[in-house]
Image: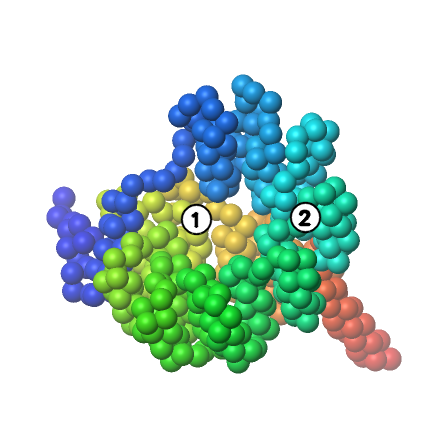
Amino acid sequence: MPFRPTLPRRCLHDWKLTSFISAVSSLASSPSAALPAGAAPAARTPAAYNALMSAYSSAGRTDEVVRLFRSLPFPPNAPFYTTLISSLANSGCHHAALAAFASLLRSGAPLTSSAFTALLNWRGGASPEFYFKVVLQAMDALGCSPDAAAYNCLISMLCDKHKMEEALGVFDLMLDKGVLPTVRSYTAILHGYCQQGKLRHAERFVDGMIQVGCLPDVVSYSVLIEGLCIVGEFGMVERILEESEEKGWTPNAVTYNIYMAALCRINDSDEAFRQFHIMRSRGLSPTVETVNILFDCLCRASMFIEAENLLEYSEELGWDVDVFSYNTLMSRLYDAGYFIKVLKLLVHLIKKGIGPDKLSFTIAIRSLCRTGKFRLAKSLMENEGIEYDVVTFNTFIHEIYKARNFQGVQLTCANMPRGMPDDFTNAMVRRNKVVIHRCKESEQDYED
């Protein structure tokens, strides 16, 4: 049997590959912060129970939060309810969060502003004005004055809806109520400006924060950097990072991940890897997101063979590969026109025991369509074991439309679950009907 050198020995010639392997190695050697299921608190005290519930909540383990809440050896107080409500709301269990809040009201436990703020995380489809009228006014009515965190939630909602004037008005309301805006209040406004591409407003807003004595922190500057990256102001990003010590803040891994991801999107993999080395020189450890970004950089640099080898040797490297990594490579292979390789990678993904997700199948369906294998794509779409979303359906509809399979477009649209078609689907249906009508007119003219 021929000797097969290990991946690290084969990668010594390429600095990007060695950098990636270094990131994976650092991540693999870092202590795991994952909490095991079914963990018990260090002591049978309220503080120990709530600390463990909070840890599970931060890890997104709502099921464990509920388990601990139900097993409390003493009556729950407002902090316990707050942790439960926050976890349920953040995980999208909206009705359960409301039920937990109702249970808090019935318990007779003293209400706190934190409990209301936790409920504010449940936004659903309601407007910010609804929350202002219902939640904040209810707090006042119950003698529980809204604190800065509650107002910050409202500010964030307004900014997400691009209602900047109203968000700024909340600042005045806070001051009228005797509540001083915090750095989170300012950062929410900053994020709103960046979302709308109003970078000059954002920069002036940061200067204003400094002038009033509310110094921007790493979150504030990371938000600003993300906004600058969106519009391609990378020179400004460099200046902000260089002046960080002078301005009294220190970039963290999230800050560099934002910057590297933006560089990756514009295919500047060399600079992205250079920023990774700067990040490491500052004593920062790579995160899972860092590794994913660097892997995407390799894929965007058309280092497909190397990327496939990295996936193959993932266990040897100690890299806990998930479906995200496979989807990344499959997407870049599709963009480069390697449709057959996409399909082979899907098979390899399944053989490795990693379950494909909707994106995996969407990329595969697009690849099948581009290679003319519409029947196979259709059979994949009809697999009842896969719950496709509107993006997958629209992808298939668009591909068969381009192939002039107008009857197929009609049938696929008719078979979509009720309520799933969106504006793109409806536009394709209208366009398809026009084409079919013209085809029938042409046939009639020919017969005449």
Which of the pair 48/321 is nearer the observer? 48
Q: For the N terminus, which image quadrant?
A: top left
Badge 2: residue crowd in 10 Å (few <14, some 14–19, many ≥20): some
Return the x and y of residue 133 as percentages of the image width and height.
77, 53
Q: Nearer the viewer, mark 1 or mark 2?
A: 2
Return the x and y of residue 361 as percentages of the image width and height.
52, 52
Secondary structure at numbered mark 2: loop
Which of the pair 375/120 is nearer the observer? 120
Q: Please, what is the three-letter code of the amino acid marked with disc 2?
A: Ser
Q: For the C terminus, which image quadrant?
A: bottom right
Is residue 367 left or right of 315 when viewed as pictured?
A: right
Residue at the spot of label 2 = 145
What is the quadrant of residue 302 in the picture? bottom left
Return the x and y of residue 53 as percentages of the image width and height.
50, 33
Q: Please, what is the three-letter code of the amino acid marked with disc 1?
A: Val
Residue at the spot of label 1 = 323
**Rendered view: 416 above or below 237:** above
**Rendered view: 153 above or below 225:** above
Q: Residue placed at 29% from the left, 41% from the top?
A: 31
Q: Residue placed at 38% from the left, 74% from the top?
A: 240
Is residue 414 left or right of 43 when viewed as pictured?
A: right
> Closer to the N terminus: mark 1 or mark 2?
2
Query: How far apart are the two marked residues, 1 and 2, measured between alpha carbons?
Result: 46 Å
Secondary structure at numbered mark 1: helix
